[in-house]
Amino acid sequence: ADLYFLVLIRLLTSVVSIYYYLKIIKLLMTGRNKEITPHVQNYRRSPLRSNNSIKLSMIVCVIASTIPGISMNPITWVLPITKKCIYI
């Protein structure tokens, strides 16, 4: 009931986190190329890092995260049985 102190802490941490996230977004949008050293600019890229491998890894991740969600759905038939067992 009197948890205003926790609400205040939550608001302060939210403001701080928004500030840091906006700093990252600003850095991504402005794209400061001046800070890249010559070693990073001349770094040889791996042949495995192509657009096809990125697309493939994204597809694998989507499938890997979707299958458990779909397979967990049939377990809802157990809920009425467990409710009966709890209230015996």
Image (spheres, grey):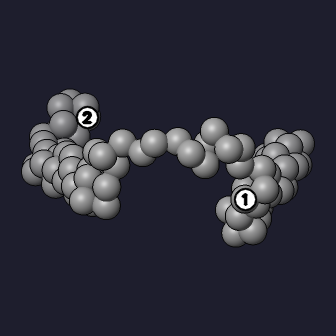
The residue positioned 26% from the left and 53% from the top of the image is 53
| Residue 63 appears left or right of 32 | left
| Residue 42 appears left or right of 31 | left
The residue positioned 18% from the left and 37% from the top of the image is 82
| Residue 68 appears left or right of 51 | left
Q: The disc labelled 2 sits on which kind of residue?
A: Tyr
Up the image or down, 39 lies above or below 62; here it is: above
Q: Quadrant of the C terminus?
A: top left
Q: x%, y% of residue 60?
A: 21, 50
Circle 2 residue: 87
Residue sitting nearer the eye, 13 or 79: 13
Up the image or down, 53 lies above or below 2; here it is: below
In the rendered image, is residue 21 in sight? Answer: no
Circle 1 residue: 33
Q: Nearer the viewer, mark 2 or mark 1?
A: 1
In the rendered image, is residue 46 in sight? Answer: yes
- As helix, strand or loop, the secondary structure at mark 1 comes to helix
The residue positioned 22% from the left and 40% from the top of the image is 83
Q: Residues within 10 Å of mark 1 (few under 14, many from 20)?
A: few
Q: x%, y% of residue 24?
A: 73, 56
